[in-house]
Amino acid sequence: MRIVSADSHVLEPADLWVRALAGGRFAQRAPRVVEDRERGTHHFLIDGLAPQPVSLPGAAGKSSEELREGGSFDDARAGGWDLEARLADQDVDGIAAEVLYPSISMALTQLTDAEYELACARAYNDWLAELCAGAPDRLAGIALVPTVDVDAAVAEVARMHDAGLRGVLVPGRPPEGHYAEARFDPLWAACAERWLPVSFHIALTGDPVGDPMLGSGIRMMTVMSVVQAMQQTLSLFVFGGVFDRHPELRVISAEHDAGWVAHYAYRLDQLFERHRHWLAPDVTIRRTPSEYLGTNACFTFQKDPVAVETRHRVGVSQLMWASDYPHSDSTWPHSRKVIERDFEGIPDDELELLVGGNAAALYSL
C-alpha cells in the first residue's frame, strides 16, 4: 500500500536566511541561529520575535522522557533539512511521499514589517522549492505566502507555482479585515486557477474571537481553540461566498484533527436552515453549508479514531492521514503500526484513499 503523509514538515537549515539574504537590504536582520553554550542549545533569532527553539520541531522518534524545550541541531533529525537523510527516513517509516510545511518559518507571519516578512518568506520558498526538486515524486512543498499585500501574495503564488511548489500556506487571518472581502478574490483565483490548495495550519490558524479561557487564566482551556478558529475560518469561506465565487478553490485544515467535522457540518446545515432568514438575510449561498465542506475542504489528522469512525459523514475523499515528521508529535518511525491500529477493519479501498490516495491526487504525487 502506498502511504503519503499529507502533513509533514521541514526544519529550516541554520544558514538558510543568512545565506539567502546576504548582500541585500535585510542582510543584517536575517534570521539566524544562536547558541547558548552553557546549555548546549540552539535558537533561531528573527528580528522582532521571541527566540524560536529548534529541538521539538526536529524531535521525531524521541521518547516523551527525552523531549525538552531546549536542544540543538545535533539533537534534531537531519531529515528536516537534508534530502538524502529525509528520503532514508521515509524508507524506514514505509512512507512513499510527503507534503511539506514549514516549522520555524511559521513565526514569520507574526512580523509587522511587511517587506521584511515577504523577503524572509521568499527566501524560505526558494529553499523549499530546491529541496523538493530533488525528489518531486516524493516531496510536495507548500509555499508560505504572507497576505498583508494581496498583489504581492498573488505574485508569490505565481512564482512558486512556476518553481514547482504544490500548495499555499497563509496566516489564519490577514493583518486587517477578513478573507471573504473582495480584495482577496485575486489571491483565491490565482490559487484555484493553478489547482494550488490553500492551507490553514495549526499554529497559524489564529485564536478564535473572544477569550477561550473565559477570563479564568486556565491555559488548559485553550486546547480546543485551534479547532474553533478553523471552524470560524471555514464558516467565513462558506457564508462569505468565497467558495461560490471560486468553486475550484480547495482549503486544507491541517493538523486540527478531523473528528469534529461531522458534527460541525450537521450543525451548520441545521441552524442555517432554521435561522437564516433572520440571522443571515444577506447570505445568499448556492448550496447547503455541508456541501461546500464536501467539495472544497479537506482535513488532515494523525491519530484521530473519531475521524475514521465518522468518515462517511465527512466524506472519505476529504480526509488525509499525516505523520507530522520530523516534529515531536510525529508517528515516525512507527507510522505503519499506527495506521494498522487506528484503521483496523477499514475496507481496503477506503484505507488506500485515507492514507495516501487522497493526498496523492490532491498534490499530483
Image: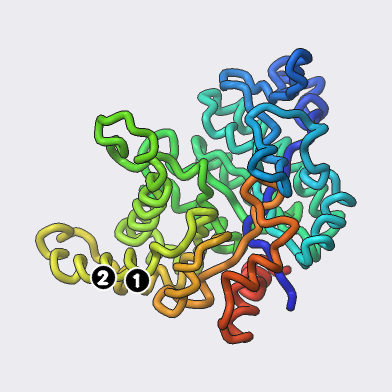
Near mark 1 (Cα within 10 A), the count class, few <14, some 14-19 or many ≥20, is: many
Locate residue 19 relative to residue 270 in the image: left or right: right
N-terminal label among 2 and 1: 2
Whether residue 361 is visible to the viewer of this picture, yes or no, is no
Residue in view at x 63 percent, y 30 percent: 69
Q: Which mark is residue 252?
A: none
Reading the image, the residue beneath label 2 is 269
Locate residue 38 relative to residue 329 in the image: left or right: right
Near mark 2 (Cα within 10 A), the count class, few <14, some 14-19 or many ≥20, is: some
Q: Residue furthest right?
A: 84
Residue 15 x %, y %: 81, 28
Q: Quadrant of the C terminus?
A: bottom right
Q: Quadrant of the N terminus?
A: bottom right
SS at mark 1 in the image: helix
Q: Are marks 2 and 1 in contact (CB under 8 Å)?
A: yes
Locate residue 294 relative to residue 138 in the image: left or right: left
Whether residue 308 is visible to the viewer of this picture, yes or no, is yes
Residue in view at x 30 percent, y 40 percent: 209
Reading the image, the residue beneath label 1 is 290
